[in-house]
Structures are given as structure tokens and as C-alpha cells.
Amino acid sequence: MADKQYKLVTCTINGVRRQTMVDVRASLTDMLRNDYQLTSVKKGCEVGECGACNVIIDGECYNSCIYLAVWAEGKNIRTLESLMGPSGELSDIQQAFIDETAVQCGFCTPGFIMSAVEILESGKEYSRDELRKLLSGHLCRCTGYENILNAVEKTMKKRLAMNHEV
């Protein structure tokens, strides 16, 4: 009976192939935080409402608190830690959050940035209202929403301008 409570999960996390035994009831948040010390994945509401735990799975953002760890089998998972450059440099979106003062307490920031990464990687240009809607699955208790929108919009426009130059 005990063998049915745990399952071996093999997946790629931040570019590294990983394998771990997980409780079949464990969330992806728990696996990432407890087994791999990826503390950018925050435990907020644990019911998929606040966005603090957002990660990118096979190119799409998910609330990892309501995504079972066993569902990660064969998936490619990216957390905020994947954005850091080889010498520890920040990505453009992380720098934009700093430049636009979009970071206050910082608890919601990793989830917002991972949603922003999905938006930015789409290569599409969104209006401010569309960006607001795309980021609406996040709660920020410090009410930094406008600065967060500014950071995402600024980075989107810079990337699109760079792509037009090439």
C-alpha cells in the first residue's frame, strides 16, 4: 500500500534534468521549495488565487500550488532562478522591476515576473489594458500594480523594438 503514496517524477527544472520521489498529494510548489530549495516559488494562498507561486511549465504559466508534483513528469519547468545570467546578472524584466520601483515587499514579485516572461516570450504587443488583464491573476498587498505594469510594458516595448531592428 505504501508504494502507491509515492511516485518517481522525472522532469527538467531550470534546464537541469531532475528526478525525485514525491508524495502523490504534494503540490509542485512543495516539490520545488522542499526538494530543490527554489524559494522564489512563494507559498501564498495555496488555492491558486494570488499568483505568488507562478512557474512556467512547457512555456505556459501555472499556479504551482494547485498543480500536483506528479503532473510534472516529463515537463520543462522554469522558476525565477532560471532568469539569472551566468555571472548572476539580472534579466531585462527583473531590471525593469527595479528601475520602475515595481518591487516593494517583494513577496509577489517572482510570480509577477514569471507571468511577465510568458507575456514577453509571446512576442506580441499588448495594450496597457490587455497587460492589466494578463497580470490580473496576481495579488500585491503593497499595491505596486501601476509600477509593475510600467515595468512589463517598458520591457515589452524594448524587446519589440529590438526585434524590429534585426
Image (tube, grey):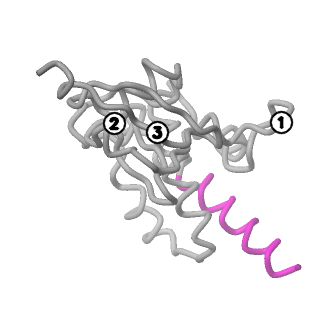
Residue in front for this viewpoint, 48 or 15: 15
Quadrant of the image occupied by residue 8: top left
Name the spot of residue 123 as percent of width and height, x first: 63, 73
Percent position of residue 91, x then y: 74, 45
Res. 86 mark:
1
Instruction: Measure the alpha-carbon separation of dots 2 and 3.
Output: 10 Å
The residues tagged by marks 2 and 1 sit, at their Cα atoms, a distance apart of: 28 Å
Category of crowding for the residue at label 2, using alpha-carbon neighbours closer than 10 angstroms: few (below 14), some (14–19), many (at least 20): many
Amino acid at the residue labelled 1 = Pro
Instruction: Name the quadrant containing residue 98.
Output: top right
Judged left or right of residue 83, residue 146 is left
Is 50 left, or right, of 81 in this rendering?
left
Above or below residue 1? Residue 18 is below
Three-letter amino acid code at disc 3?
Answer: Thr
For the stretch drawn in magenta, what is the main secondary structure?
helix
Identify the amino acid type marked 2: Ala
Q: Which residue is mark 3?
A: 10
Of the two numbered discs 2 and 1 in the rendering, the one whose residue sits closer to the viewer: 2
